[in-house]
Image (cartoon, grey):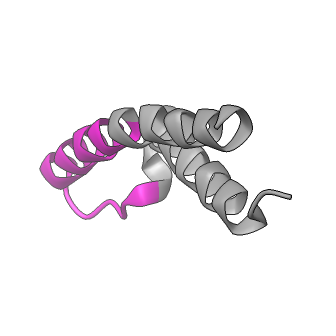
Amino acid sequence: MKDPIGLIIALLVTGMGVAGIFFPQLAYRVVTPEQAARDRKRARIFGFIFLPLGVILLLFHFLG
């Protein structure tokens, strides 16, 4: 039987990636418009990093 902790971590990383891409407003608090634009961009970048990483972890869990 495979380790369930690995699956949980892979799902969390994938979920963080999806939230960063599609819901970046959840990752920051608006203080000024400049800060909101910068933080939205930063959250989307992290989302585009975490989503493929999470998918790779899921593939390793199910195929490896």
Q: Residue at x 59, y 39 (%)?
A: 60
* Residue 55 visible to the viewer: yes
Q: Quadrant of residue 52?
A: top left
The C terminus lies in which quarter of the figure?
top right
Whether residue 23 is visible to the viewer of this picture, yes or no, is no
Residue at image point 67% right, 44% down: 61
Task: State the predominant SS element of the stretch in magenta.
Answer: helix
Q: Which residues are magenta?
A: 27-47
Check residue 31 for magenta coloring. Answer: yes
Q: Residue furthest right?
A: 1
Could you tell whether 52 is left or right of 31 in the image? right
Q: Look at the image and tell me in which quarter the N terminus lies.
A: bottom right
Residue 32 located left or right of residue 27: left
Q: Position of residue 27 (x, y in %)?
A: 42, 58
Give the residue at x 27% y 37%: 45
Against 29, residue 41 (above or below) is above
